Image (cartoon, rainbow, N blue to C red):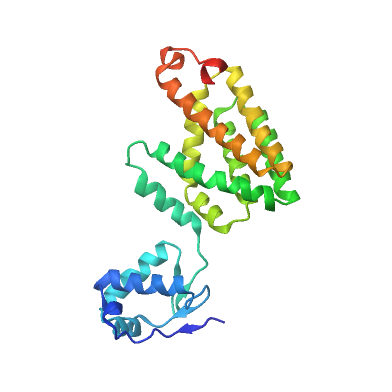
Amino acid sequence: MTRKIQPPTITRTQEAEGTGFSKVFAFLRDKLLEGSIRSGDRLVPERELALQLGVSRPIVREALRALSMMGVVEIRERVGTIVRKPDVSVLGDFFAFSMAQQADIVDDVMQARIAIEVQAVRLACRHASTSDLERIAAAVDRIEATVDDSEEGSRADYEFHTALVRASRSETLMQLYAAMSTLLMRSHHERRDVVGGDPAVKQYLVEDHARIFQALVARDEDRADQVLRKHFSIGDEYRRKAATGPAARGRPPTREEVA
């Protein structure tokens, strides 16, 4: 059974700020953040909400439809507008669309990824369960098995790092990471394409992920942090050299050139 939420009468100047769509959107957003509206709750009818906020019903309807597209609410015929459990995949689509036309977006996302994973790996050392470690171990095995396949290899790489973040047990980190999933997959795929056919670099990829896993098993936060940072640092250096080095001239770089 859903609760029917009665919005408070707005009397204060700061509550009445904003007009039209932005006012409705901000009001509902704030109520969700405050927790006074929860998943499963039913909002008051559009007419009542419009009267409370001093806007037209079409404006309220537009705001609710926008929230519906974001997965925040569900508009049910003859029932009303129901607050939904957040769907982070919608946020991922928003990220992808909003950033798609930005130059060098993959590098920018990479920096956000590093910030999330470095903290996540420390938390994972404290909180990872047996099933978390088994999931990460399986991803390491899959990275090795697919190292010659750019498509499957990039997917295995993504699964490893996703499992690492999941093992942190931080809901916020997991949701932020999931929100970037489309762009992260693109990043993994582009990096694997750059690797080319160099056996030494492929071996390093397998061994490096195994080292991260071993640090997790040992519950060694400092070691895990160090290995992961080095993993990202070498990846950045590799991409830089690949753009101007031997790979750009027609042959893949050697392991020594990567390091």
Residue located 71% across and 39% down the image: 137
Residue located 47% across and 36% down the image: 187
Q: Can residue 142 be seen by looking at this rendering?
A: no
Position in image of residue 206 (x %, y %):
65, 28
Count of numbered circles in the view? 0
Position in image of residue 175 (x %, y %):
52, 55
* Most foreground residue, 226 or 253: 226
Instruction: Examine the rendered structure and indicate whether residue 133 appears above or below residue 84.
Output: above
User: Dividing the image into 4 quarters, which one contains the N terminus?
Assistant: bottom right
* Most foreground residue, 43 or 248: 248
For this view, does 34 lie left or right of residue 59?
right
User: Dividing the image into 4 quarters, which one contains the C terminus?
Assistant: top right
Residue located 45% across and 41% down the image: 111
Q: Outermost residue toward the front?
A: 222
Instruction: Examine the rendered structure and indicate whether residue 102 appears above or below residue 89.
Output: above
Q: Can residue 190 be seen by looking at this rendering?
A: yes
Residue located 48% across and 12% down the image: 251
Position in image of residue 160 (x %, y %):
62, 40
Instruction: Examine the rendered structure and indicate whether residue 229 appears above or below residue 195.
Output: below
Position in image of residue 17 (x %, y %):
26, 75
For this view, does 228 lie left or right of residue 98?
right
* Most foreground residue, 223 or 63: 223
Instruction: Examine the rendered structure and indicate whether residue 133 appears above or below residue 207.
Output: below
